[in-house]
Amino acid sequence: MAVHTSSPSLRPGKGTERPGPAPRRIRHPLNSRFWIALAPALVLYTVFTLYPMAQVVLSSVTDSNGFTGDSDFVGLDNFARMFTRDPALLDALGNTGVYAFFRIVVQTVLAFGIAVLLNKKMVGGNVYRATFFAPIVISPVAIVFTWSFMFDPTTGTVNTTLRDLGLGSWAQDWLGDYDLALYSVILVDIWASIGFSVVIFLAGLGTIPSEVLEAARVDGATGWRSLRHITVPLMRPTFGLVLVLAVNGALRAFDTVYLMTKGGPGGATELYMTRVFFEGFVKNHFGYASSMAVVVIVVLIGIAYLQNRFEREMS
Amino acid sequence: MNHVRKLARSAPRHLVLMILSAGMVYPLVIMLLTSVKSNAEVLQNPTGLPRAPTLENFVTTWYEGRFDLLFANSVGLTLVSMTAATFVAALAAYAVVRKATRLGSGIYLLLAAGIFLPMQLAVIPQFRVVRSLGLIDNYLGVVLVYVAGSIPFGVFLMAAFMRQIPREIVQAAVIDGAGYFRLFGSIFLPLARPAIVTFWVLQGVGIWNDYLVPYLFLTDPEKRTLTTGVLYFQQQYLADWGNIMAGVVIMSLPVLLLFVFAQRYFVSGLYAGAVK
């Protein structure tokens, strides 16, 4: 997720110092209790997070298959292969680009519009909000089955509705058509995650002082003009955050796509992450999958760094 | 008069919101409607209201899919994991907050930095660790993976909150003779309750909905959770959409109810999670 060092809470505070006098006497037992309190978290984090992650980084320069011990050092060969000898990965990268474009542009614009509309006390406001947020709490498994049912070419609700409206010629095999499947999958993921962007935009809108908008109104700026000249410029940091999260989401997108289409038909919905999973778990190319993973980690860190710098320049 | 004008001015806003909301709710409505139609009716009438609403799907799905078992497994695994995760993370957050030294902040940064690691990428070595500990097909392995995965965000969220606790309260408790762990249990834990509840709710929903960890680490059918159970159920009942949707509703209803009652915690938690 995004680095956000400008938020004060990320820095360790100096709020509660070790209370009590005579530090020398107390130091020893206090220290051991400090380690006792930390031990469960530190041990679990090291064993199940840091160690596996270190394994990923180390394996990225080997031909490890992931399940048996022996592997050979292959240098940067895995990385060279990614960019030169893996057409399936390049196709997946293209799909990821299309996917990212929709998640970044369409979802962000739509979510911003929804947040602006919701950012007002009104009758039914909570009901509207709940409808946008509800999909966030539903399991990918439930989302995938519901949408697979809706997209079913013969008995699905989408095609049935089109036929009932006399638009039968628009009926499609939404998940089985090579040119359409990717867009169907994107639609599902936008539906599932747009509430998340709305939450962030609403929080950002909440930070705009009402005096500023009031002053603009007195000066005659209302509606669109106030939105364009006051709200949007003041929301720039929030836009930055939503964009970073969208890029993040696009690079990590996996659950829905994998469960719904397994990357098919014919690789049409293959994304970067589904390739990583396929190489690692199906083909047992753990070394190669690890180098793909390392590239994602580097890109994510790079994006977080850029966003950080961008924000520092803004303030 | 004023009232009418106000209503007329807000009408376009409501119209747009209603259309968008309807689009958002539509899949959920389809999910519910399909679950109360017989499998035969679903094929003839996939979009409309049920002509003969029935709860039969729930009964057959519950028994044939052994949902009593799946439900109990999911409830147990989620409750134990989220409680253990909250306790471990809260204790670690307490330790780093109380230790206002370079060591304390260094450990805090080490733990919180885990937020940036895309852990889906590390499932293969994680699998190897769990296997070498002999914990495949053992709930303990899954609980430990969940707890470990929740530590970075948990420490971040709860440490931020615990730092706001006024020093005077801490000092007063120390003067009254409260020891290190006593102070955690009777001052820090209760005062950090909003952060703890937020974390608990978010973590609970995440674990309840997760399918990858149980799918990889629990292969014994007796140990499946609702998510993996519904996945297998669908493979057996391919076109019995009524039954499948009943399973999906059984799986989703608890989190949707939790969401309705805890929306406040949920939204604040999501926002905290986003700006991390």
Image: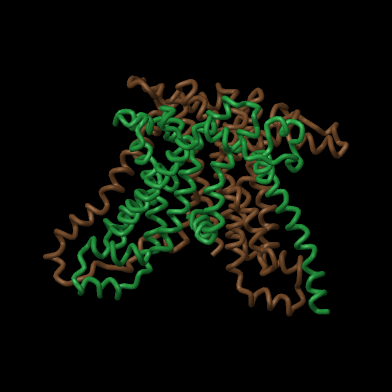
Chain colours: A brown, B green
Q: Can residue A76 be seen in this view?
A: yes
> Residue sitting at 61 percent across and 73 percent down?
A209
Q: Is residue A130 above or below residue A165?
A: below
Pinpoint residue B130: horizontal percent, then vertical percent.
34, 32
Residue extending farthest to the left is A25
> Residue sitting at 38 percent across and 23 percent down?
A67
Q: Is residue A186 visible?
A: no
Viewer-proximal residue among A260 and A95? A260
Pinpoint residue A60: horizontal percent, then vertical percent.
42, 29
Pinpoint residue B59: horizontal percent, then vertical percent.
57, 36
Q: Is residue B226 above or below residue B156?
A: above
Quadrant the C terminus of chain A occupies: bottom right
Q: Is residue A4 above or below residue A85?
A: below
Q: How many labels does the image show?
A: 0
Residue extending farthest to the right is A166
> Residue sitting at 76 percent across and 68 percent down?
A223
Viewer-proximal residue among A218 and A145? A145
* Residue B75 picture quarter: top left
> Residue sitting at 62 percent across and 36 percent down?
B56
* Residue B252 picture quarter: top right
The reply, left or right, for residue A201 in relation to residue B148 is right
The reply, left or right, for residue B114 in relation to residue A260 is left
The reply, left or right, for residue B135 in relation to residue B248 is left
* Residue B241 picture quarter: top right
